[in-house]
Image (cartoon, rainbow, N blue to C red):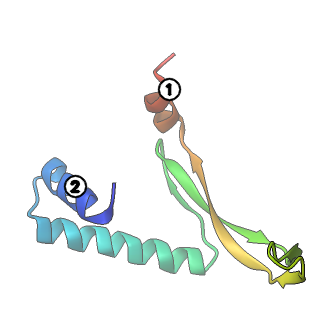
């Protein structure tokens, strides 16, 4: 599913016009981006948690030449699914 398809589904489920759904989605993405850049976690009970995860710098190799390349330290995002999401994906037990 891409962004345009998500906007259509969001509009249908929430009973909104597509423009309104697009604004809601863009606001959500802006908030998530802002909070992640501030190393804050975002938790939606039952759905999951977005966690900023630091990665150390490391040495890798260029696959073509075999030359060592230093990959700098960075922060990435980890998603930890919530209980209800996992149950919905795997069937309730």
Residue 80 in picture, x, y percent from top left: 60, 49
Mark 1 residue element:
helix
Residue 28 in picture, x, y percent from top left: 36, 69
Marker disc for residue 10 = 2
Marker disc for residue 37 = none
Residue marked by disc 1? 90
Q: Does 65 sit above or below residue 21?
A: below
The residue furthest front is: 64
Name the quadrant containing residue 19.
bottom left
Q: CA distance from mark 1 to mark 2?
A: 23 Å
Say which quadrant the N terminus sits in: bottom left
Q: Residue at x 24, y 64 (%)?
A: 4
Q: Is residue 91 left or right of residue 7?
A: right
Upstream in the sequence, badge 1 or badge 2? 2
Name the quadrant containing residue 24.
bottom left
Residue 66 in picture, x, y percent from top left: 89, 76
Residue 57 in picture, x, y percent from top left: 85, 78
Q: Residue at x 19, y 65 (%)?
A: 21
């Amino acid at each position: 599913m891409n962004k345009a398809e998500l906007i259509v589904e969001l509009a249908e489920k929430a009973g909104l016009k597509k423009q309104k759904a697009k604004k809601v989605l863009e606001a959500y993405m802006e908030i998530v981006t802002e909070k992640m850049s501030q190393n804050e976690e975002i938790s939606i009970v039952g759905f999951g948690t977005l966690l900023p995860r630091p990665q150390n710098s490391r040495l890798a190799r260029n696959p073509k030449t075999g030359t060592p390349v230093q990959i700098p330290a960075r922060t990435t995002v980890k998603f930890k699914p919530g209980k209800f999401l996992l149950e919905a994906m795997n069937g309730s037990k």
